[in-house]
Image (tube, grey):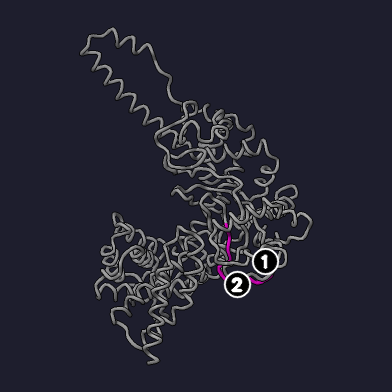
Amino acid sequence: MGGAEAPEGDVGGVLEERLRGLLCHNPAWLGQDAAPPWCADLSMNHEELLERTRQWAATGGGAQGASGSAAAPMRVAHNEEFGRHLVAARDMAAGEVVVVEPPLLLALRERSPPSCLTCFRRATAYTCPACGFFLCGPECGAAAHAEECEVLRRLGLGQPAPRPEEEARLAALPDEQRAQAREMLQQAAATAEQQRQLEVLRQYRLVAAVRTLLVMHRSPAVAAAVAALQGRVNPSSIRHANHQRRVVEVAVGQLGVASDPALVHRVCAVWDTNGFEVPLAWGNRVVGLFPVSSLLTHDCRGNTQQWFTAEGVMVVRAVTRVAAGDVFTTSYTDPQWATLLRQDHMRISKQFTCTCVRCRDPTELGTFLGSPCCPACRLPLLSTDPLDPKAPWRCSNHACTHTATAAQVAAVGAKIGAKLKGLKSNDAAGLTSLSRQLEETLPSTHHVLMQLHVSTLKTLVARDLREVSDEDLSTLLAISSLVMGVLRRLEQPLTRLSVRMGREEIRLAVESERRGLVTGQAARDRLQELQGVAEECKLVMGWDTRMPPFQCVYNEYRSALQRLATETQG
């Protein structure tokens, strides 16, 4: 994503107008004197935040901004390095809401399971008779679906019409032959229905482009916003060839939803570059366009993180202090991935090379996340140029002369991947056993081991730690300490992964103290070290009800800390 390019026209003006239009969703932009008092509550749940904002807007609160008294905490800027991006207009505290932005458009992902085309809930029992796409039922979004249905029915995937002549032929057969023939016809119809539904799922790749083009036709504002977003069309890429065959030729030739192939390619590129994966309350994940939030510049250790409400509204929060003049950044890759994987993802999906501090550092901020062990001296191998996927690797021990090609390093990852097949994320014993095996060839902080450790800790979320043996508890404490040590280098403090792992770190420490495995001043010191983590978890986990519950953990932690304080004073 990382900003919007500057095509012909007033791109900056379009994006700034979009930014101004978000005032009704961001009353905090009115400033301390005019904003509702509840805007200062950083712990407010996102759903409550949206509900209070709706009530505020409904009573005319947004009119204050129309007179020019509102000022967003960011401005749209442009330079050669980042293109269009967002710069902080004032200091922002960690946890503060940067922007609340409803989606410009939402659509099913290419590999979505059978889902309603209008509300995105899982749907398998009903398909539209005309176009054949899955819906919750005939009443779900009937008006919203009508326009798309008129276009999509040209794919010829609608339900086949009844064939009365078949019944007439069956009626003429003897009873025994009629039963056999009817059974064969029913089997054939079931097979044809399965094939038809599979073809519907294959067309999900097409739906986002069709929906966008239809809305652009009837809304100049949406057309301008889409045109302002970054979307590089590379005719020599495999992605371009796939779009041409699967989307452009169908949209132009068969559906007639556009006459200009270049426009359809541009729309596809906009979705590729700017589409956010949006988790909805009912479990489905869709993809959405958020023009202002798309201007967040990518950084593998971003200073903001995006959250989504139950219905897909984005809430962007600062995850560390952001000073006036700083560029707002966020990460569009998994922080648990090594540089080779993150760079490959960015080149393919976003069509640029990240040059952030972490990507330039062969040690990945001292974590050695992507380094296999040197077979000669067991120390980590390091890339000679992390930004070049073909650069050779050398041992970090200057006295060792061992080198490896990038292909050899990648082969280590492929070999490990084979061992991971079939291993379930909730198999704590299997995860721990495999981790021990892999430590023979990988540093303890290698990204594969880290992901296994994170998966192990996630299995504890709903588990009663009193059921864990002393030996396993000691192992889990060591894993937690290792994971948190890496995350504190790679992640800002208020990110989802940091607080989820922090929650388990606190639970393990409290249980260790309860059993007397750590006692006295040592136990008190350890729990006191976790005070900041506890407050961060309490804050962040309160934002989204889909996060693991923390209040009970916090209460147990505070009780243990107070008890230890009383004992040591006595």
315 w.r.t. 179: above or below: below
Q: Which mark is residue 88?
A: 1
Residue 474: x %, y % from top left: 29, 76
Region in magenta: 315-325
Q: How crowded is the residue under tag 2: few (<14 C-alpha within 10 Å), some, or many (20+)?
A: some
Q: Please, which residue is most extreme toward the bottom here?
A: 570
Magenta stretch encompasses residue 27: no
Disc 2, SS: loop
Position of residue 361 measured from the top left corner of the image (x, y, whole percent): 51, 72
In this view of the protein, which residue sits in the foreground, 540 or 208? Answer: 540
Seen in the picture, residue 3 relative to 140 is either above or below; the reply is below
Residue at 47 percent of width and 48 percent of height: 285
Q: Is residue 546 above or below residue 242?
A: below
Tag 2 residue: 321
Q: Secondary structure at mark 1?
A: strand
Residue that sits furthest to the left in the current view: 176
Membership of 323 in magenta stretch: yes
Which residue occupies the extreme right position in the image? 67
State the residue at coordinates (45%, 65%): 497
- Which residue is located at x 59 percent, y 67 percent? 41
Q: Is residue 549 above or below residue 144?
A: below
Q: Can residue 298 be spotted in the picture?
A: yes
Tag 1: amino acid: Ala
Quadrant, the C terminus: bottom left
Q: Position of residue 256 (x, y in %)?
A: 60, 29
| Residue 249 visible in rendering | no
Residue at screen point 28% across, 79% down: 515
Between 84 and 348, the one nearer to me in the picture: 84
Q: Earlier in the sequence, mark 2 or mark 1?
A: 1
Residue 164: where, in percent of width, then height? 38, 13
Given the image, on which type of amino acid does mark 2 rest? Answer: Arg
Q: Main secondary structure of the magenta part?
A: loop
